[in-house]
C-alpha cells in the first residue's frame, strides 16, 4: 500500500483539473446498528470528502435496497444549500445499500473557439434533442456516455448480501471483506467489476474523514490486480471515501466514449 502525503496548498496547485473536481459523498452517522434503530445520512459535494463547503448532493435517483431486496423509502428528506439529509429506520435484519446511480449522455464541441455543451445543465438527454441541437460535423465533437454510482451501506444485526448483488452494468464494488466489518489493523479486500467482470489495473483513491483538521489530505492510492481485487490497510478509525473510474470505448450510440465511476463511503471502527 502506498501512502502519499502532500500539503493541502501544494496539492491544489499541482493536481490536474480532473482531480480538483468536487467530490460527492453520502455519509451515514453510523453503519453498524440494531434492528429498528434510525440512522441519518448527509449527502453533499465538496472540496474534500465530508466537508460541507460546496453544494448539497442531488438525490433524485436515490434508491435504498433493504436486506430482502425490496426498495425502502427514505424519511424526512430535506435539501439545504450545503448538504441534503434523510433518515432511515432499519426494520429488517441485514445489510442495506443506499445508492444514487446517475446515467446520461453529453456532447461537447468547438464553436469558433468557444466550447459548446449539450444538453444544458439539469436537462436530460433525448435522441430527438441530440438530433436537432448537436451539429454532427462540429469541430472536436465528443459524445460521452456516463454511469456514476454513489453508494454507502449500513447493517442492522447480522449482515447479509442480498442487496449487494452486482447488476453487471458499469463499475461496481464487491465485498470480499464485509463492507460493515472494517477495523483498524485488519486489512480489508474488495473487488471491482466492470460490466460484471473483474476490472484490472483500476486506480483507486481512498481519503479518511477529517481533512479539515490535519495539514495533509493523506490520500491512499491503490490499483486493482488482474482479478479486480485490492487490499486496504486502514490507518485510522472513522469514515473513509473511496473512488475509482474507468473510461473506454464501450459506449451506447450516439456516444463514442464511456466513463463509469464508483464512489463509496465506509466506516472503519477501532477493534
Image (spheres, helix red, strand yellow):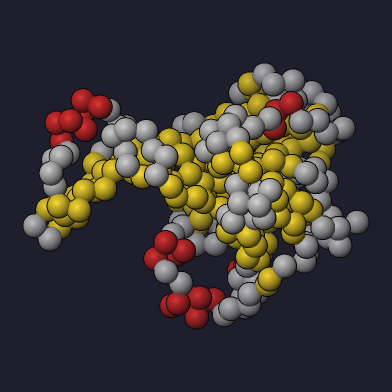
Residue at image location 15% in from the left, 36% down from the top: 133
Quarter of the picture holding the N terminus: bottom right
Give x and y (percent) for residue 145: 37, 40
Instruction: Return the residue found at the far right.
Output: 271
Residue at image location 74% in from the left, 20% down from the top: 68
Is 225 left, or right, of 188 in this rendering?
A: left
Instruction: Write down the quadrant of residue 146 in the picture.
Output: top left
Question: Would you place residue 185 above or below residue 150 in this image?
Answer: below
The count of marks equals 0
Visible residue check, residue 145: yes
Instruction: Return the residue found at the far front.
Output: 226
Residue at image location 65% in from the left, 71% down from the top: 218
Residue at image location 49% in from the left, 62% down from the top: 47
Is 65 left, or right, of 268 in this rendering?
A: left
Quarter of the picture holding the C terminus: bottom right
Give x and y (percent) for residue 30: 75, 45
Instruction: Return the residue found at the far left.
Output: 112
Front position in the image: 81 or 4: 4
Front position in the image: 194 or 134: 194
Is 133 left, or right, of 172 in this rendering?
A: left
Give x and y (percent) for residue 69: 69, 21
Is 119 left, or right, of 14 in this rendering?
A: left
Visible residue check, residue 209: no
Give x and y (percent) for residue 219: 63, 67
Amino acid at each position: 500500500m502506498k501512502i502519499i502525503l502532500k500539503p493541502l496548498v501544494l496539492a491544489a496547485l499541482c493536481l490536474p483539473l480532473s482531480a480538483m473536481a468536487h467530490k460527492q459523498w453520502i455519509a451515514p452517522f453510523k453503519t453498524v446498528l440494531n434492528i429498528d434503530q434510525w440512522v441519518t445520512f448527509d449527502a453533499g459535494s465538496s472540496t474534500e470528502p465530508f466537508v460541507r463547503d460546496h453544494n448539497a448532493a442531488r438525490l433524485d435517483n436515490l434508491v435504498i435496497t433493504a436486506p430482502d431486496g425490496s426498495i425502502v423509502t427514505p424519511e424526512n428528506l430535506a435539501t439545504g444549500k450545503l448538504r441534503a439529509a434523510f433518515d432511515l429506520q432499519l426494520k429488517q435484519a441485514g445489510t442495506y445499500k443506499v445508492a444514487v446511480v446517475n446515467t446520461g449522455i453529453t456532447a461537447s464541441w468547438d464553436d469558433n473557439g468557444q466550447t459548446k455543451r449539450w444538453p444544458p445543465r439539469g436537462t436530460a438527454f433525448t435522441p430527438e434533442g441530440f438530433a436537432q441541437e448537436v451539429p454532427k460535423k462540429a469541430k472536436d465533437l465528443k459524445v460521452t456516455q456516463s454511469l456514476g454510482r454513489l453508494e454507502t451501506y449500513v447493517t442492522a444485526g447480522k449482515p447479509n448480501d442480498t442487496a449487494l448483488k452486482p447488476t453487471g452494468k458499469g463499475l461496481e464494488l464487491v465485498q470480499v471483506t464485509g463492507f460493515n466489518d472494517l477495523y483498524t489493523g485488519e486489512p480489508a479486500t474488495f473487488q471491482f467489476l466492470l460490466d460484471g467482470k473483474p476490472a484490472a489495473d483500476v486506480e483507486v483513491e481512498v481519503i479518511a474523514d477529517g481533512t479539515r483538521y490535519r495539514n495533509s489530505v493523506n490520500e491512499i492510492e491503490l490499483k486493482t490486480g488482474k482479478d479486480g481485487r485490492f487490499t486496504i490497510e486502514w490507518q485510522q478509525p472513522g469514515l473513509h471515501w473511496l473512488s475509482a473510474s474507468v473510461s473506454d470505448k464501450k459506449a451506447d450510440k450516439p456516444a463514442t466514449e464511456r466513463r463509469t465511476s464508483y464512489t463509496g463511503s465506509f466506516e472503519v471502527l477501532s477493534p
